[in-house]
Amino acid sequence: MALLRAACRVLCAAARPKLTVAKLPQSLMMASSDSMPYLPVDMVFRFFPRWTRDKVRFFYWYYLVSFLTGLGILMGYFHTPYVGDNYDHFAETPLYLWTKSSLAKTGQLEENLRVKVHHFYPQTE
């Protein structure tokens, strides 16, 4: 009986007319208003029809150029080598200062500095 009831529900649902309209996702609806493409493809299709005659080849090169441009920006501009590698000048946060002062009050800071291994690092003195 349960199998018959399930089959009837499926058949009734298939015969019922669909009254709801499929809605696009909100992110797709807002894509034109909150995103700024690097190269507007619709303008390329409109103004450079010879470039976009073969759509598959155009999008292959478009994705390749976009990826290499993004990688170049990341590694060439955003990634500045040898910045922040000097730990003598790091920003001491309030939590760091509070922890350091509480360790100094209990005497654990001196013990930690005493047992710290220094022979891995070059001596500056």
Image (cartoon, rainbow, N blue to C red):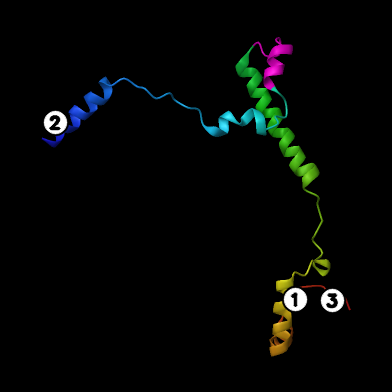
- Residue 2 % position (x, y): 14, 36
* Residue bearing the label numbered 1: 97
Q: Amino acid at mark 3?
A: Gln
> Residue farthest to the right?
125
- Residue 121 % position (x, y): 78, 73
The residue located at (75%, 69%) in the rendering is 93
Marked residue nearer the N-terminal end (1 or 3): 1
The verdict on residue 52 being magenta is yes
Q: Nearer the viewer, residue 47 or 85?
A: 47
The residue located at (60%, 18%) in the rendering is 56
* Residue bearing the label numbered 2: 4
* Residue bearing the label numbered 3: 123
The residue located at (57%, 30%) in the rendering is 28
| Image: magenta residue range | 41-53
Residue 48's image quarter? top right
Badge nearest the viewer, 3 or 2: 2
- Within 10 Å of disc 2 (Cα), the crowding (few <14, some 14-19, many 20+) is few
Marked residue nearer the N-terminal end (1 or 2): 2
- Vertical order, 110 against 1 (above or below): below
In the figure, is residue 25 to the left or right of 101? left
Residue 18's image quarter? top left
- Within 10 Å of disc 1 (Cα), the crowding (few <14, some 14-19, many 20+) is few
Marked residue nearer the N-terminal end (3 or 2): 2
One can see residue 36 in this view: yes
- Vertical order, 124 against 73 (above or below): below
Marks 1 and 3 sit apart, C-alpha to C-alpha, by: 25 Å
Q: Secondary structure at mark 1?
A: helix
- Within 10 Å of disc 3 (Cα), the crowding (few <14, some 14-19, many 20+) is few
- Residue 76 % position (x, y): 79, 42
Which label sits on residue 17?
Answer: none
